[in-house]
């Protein structure tokens, strides 16, 4: 397929309350139809908590993962977002990719936000994850990953769209907005960043600024109001491929490998 319909869900999350957050997001999704992909924020079931041991859900019996599968089946769209997961005795900030057919993929956040002590409470991801949907190859990433361009470098056009789910405070909203556009320009790809709004249990304020950006860095969805919203945009492969052919900067990119 040459197009992908993507729904961004920006929400004011309930602090450390998975049941309330699942119910709230389910209500936001009631009228969503015809989307191929629904993107939720980072740690959408709890907010950006460091209370990992108490709130982590076992991967094999996670109520939130089961809920994501149910919503994917109901909406007939892939649903993705990160949650706190316990896997083999380690807590992860894990981005789940749940399909309408019940299949799961996941990506564990690589860059852990040491300024909040995340690196002391969560395991670090070891592998990049690229998934495919309707012919689009999609790189998964979580919040702080956005600051590290080597990790997300699009060598040889191996992906078409970068997803970044976040709890990115409003005090750093300019870097958030700038980096989303920078990642799109340097990687000649679409970029989606989905952030939360409101105030969390630690008193941090979030302004949202969820965006869908094209390969030129032009925002296709950009609502600067600090509100919960559900917005759907469409991206196309033909225009992306035409631009890459006309301006093949990717052919001159430096080659490198990433150490574990």
Image (cartoon, rainbow, N blue to C red):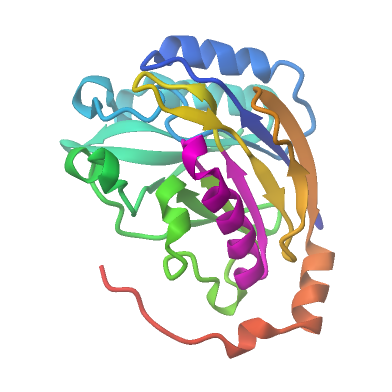
Q: Nearer the viewer, residue 181 or 88?
A: 181
User: Hey, which quadrant is residue 123 in on the image?
Assistant: top left
Which residue reaches farthest bottom? 252
**Is residue 4 among the parts visible in the rendering?**
no
Magenta stretch, main secondary structure class: helix
Residue 169 inside the magenta-drawn segment? yes
Q: In the drawing, does residue 73 fall left or right of residue 168?
A: right
Q: In the drawing, does residue 85 fall left or right of residue 142?
A: left
User: Hey, which quadrant is residue 193 in on the image?
Assistant: top right
Tell me the quadrant of the picture where the N terminus can be found: bottom right
Q: In the drawing, does residue 3 fall left or right of residue 131?
A: right
Instruction: Point out the stretch of residues depicted in magenta.
Output: 165-194
Task: Please give the name of the residue rendered at 30% of the width and 48% of the height, measured from the top-left corner.
Answer: 112
Residue 181: image x %, image y %? 64, 59
Residue 234 inside the magenta-drawn segment? no
**Is residue 233 among the parts visible in the rendering?**
yes
Q: Nearer the viewer, residue 242 or 68?
A: 242
């Amino acid at each position: 397929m040459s197009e992908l319909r993507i729904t961004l869900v920006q929400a004011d999350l309930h602090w450390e309350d998975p049941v309330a957050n699942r119910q709230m997001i389910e209500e936001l999704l009631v009228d969503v139809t015809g989307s191929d992909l629904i993107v939720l924020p980072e740690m959408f079931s709890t907010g950006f908590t460091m209370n990992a041991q108490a709130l982590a859900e076992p991967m094999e019996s996670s109520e939130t993962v089961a809920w994501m599968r149910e919503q994917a089946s109901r909406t007939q769209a892939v649903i993705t977002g990160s949650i706190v997961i316990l896997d083999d005795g380690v807590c992860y900030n894990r981005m789940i990719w749940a399909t309408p057919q019940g299949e799961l993929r996941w990506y564990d956040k690589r860059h852990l936000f040491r300024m909040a002590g995340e690196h002391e409470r969560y395991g670090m991801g070891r592998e990049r994850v690229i998934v495919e949907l309707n012919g689009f190859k999609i790189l998964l990433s979580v919040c702080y990953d956005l600051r590290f361009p080597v990790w997300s470098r699009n060598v040889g056009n191996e992906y078409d769209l970068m997803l970044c789910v976040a709890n990115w405070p409003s005090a750093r909203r300019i870097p958030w907005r700038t980096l989303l556009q920078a990642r799109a320009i340097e990687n000649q790809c679409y970029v989606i960043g989905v952030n939360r709004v409101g105030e969390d249990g630690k008193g941090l304020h979030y302004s949202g600024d969820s965006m869908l950006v094209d390969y030129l860095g032009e925002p296709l969805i950009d609502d600067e109001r600090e509100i919960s919203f559900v917005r759907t945009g469409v991206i196309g492969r033909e225009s992306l491929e035409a631009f890459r052919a006309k301006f093949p900067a990717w052919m001159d990119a430096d080659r490198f490998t990433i150490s574990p």
